[in-house]
Structure formats: C-alpha cells, structure tokens
Amino acid sequence: MTTIHASRCRPRRRPYNPPTTEREFSTPAVDWIAVARVVNEDRPLPPLNDDEQREAALLLRRKGMPRIEVSVYLCLYERLIKEWEAEAGLLEPDQLCTRDGCRHARAGRGLCVNHLEADRKRRRAQSAGTAVAA
C-alpha cells in the first residue's frame, strides 16, 4: 500500500477568472485586450510585455495547444512556459521537482534547474576531492 505524504499532494487548481469589468480590461501589468487578440490569433499580433506573454501562454496551454506550438507562436523558450505552468498549478506532480517543498518544473534527474545545478556542483566537488585524495 502506498502512503501519500502531504508534501506530495497536488494543490487544488484555481480556476482562471478573466476580467469581467471594463476597468479590468487594461491593468498596469496586463492589457487583456492584447492578450485576447493573441490568443484568438487576430492579425497583426500586438507586442506583449512579459506579464502579457505569460498570460497568453497559459491561456493557449489551457485551450490545449501543445507547449512546442505555444513556444513557436509566442517566440518563447519551452522551459519558461513549463515554469509558468508549474507556478499556475497546471503540471502533474510527476512533472515537478522531487525535492521536498519545491514546486518548480523538472529539468533533469527529477530535479528543477536550481536543484540540478546544486547537485552538479556537489558532484564536481566530490569528484575533485576524490581525485586529490588518490
């Protein structure tokens, strides 16, 4: 029988609530009309700031567009989109870092980019210490 620990349980996803009032269509960080134009593929596509790119990428992923297509469409790195998905709670638990309490997307060996780099540094230090001792 498998035991599920609280640290491994997936938090409930918060539903995406688009702006509902006219004042919310344009905020200091996100111009929702520009995001909607990008998501609906209205040409010409407007330029987006970082927050608008994040919202557009998450909306496209929620619509079912594959990450590689979102990456090409918005000219963004797939890894960045995957990180945004992890922050938004869109990734399955098996796609998250295996270190306790870390909610970032996996990059390799079951670890996120930060933990993977720390693990590489630790391995290099161990191998350098072994080489000097020999």
Image (spheres, rainbow, N blue to C red):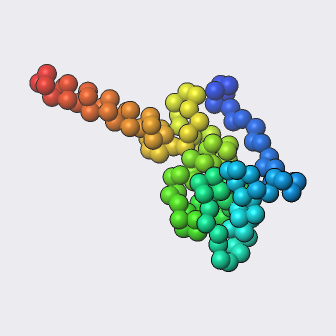
The image position of residue 100, as x and y in percent, is 55, 27
Give the residue displayed 68% in from the left and 78% down from the top. Answer: 43
- Where's residue 7, x and y in %? 64, 27
Nearest the viewer among 31 and 96 is: 31
Give the position of the N terminus as an image quadrant: top right
Left or right of 7, for residue 115: left
Q: Name the one closer to the observer, 128 or 80.
A: 80
Q: Is residue 20 above or below residue 14?
A: below
Q: Is residue 18 left or right of residue 76?
A: right
Residue 90 visible in the picture: yes
Q: Residue pushed farthest bottom?
A: 43
Residue 39 picture location, percent across and down: 71, 66
**Residue 120 x/y as whole percent:** 34, 36
Q: Is residue 39 left or right of residue 96?
A: right
Q: Is residue 5 above or below residue 80?
A: above
Rendered position, 7 above or below 20: above
How many numbered badges does the structure rendering display?
0
Residue at the extreme top of the image, as rendered: 133
The residue at the point 77 percent across, 42 percent down is 14
Which quarter of the image is occupied by the C terminus? Answer: top left
Judge whether residue 1 can be spotted in this image: no
Whether 103 is drawn above or below 85: the answer is: above
The residue positioned 75% from the left and 42% from the top of the image is 13
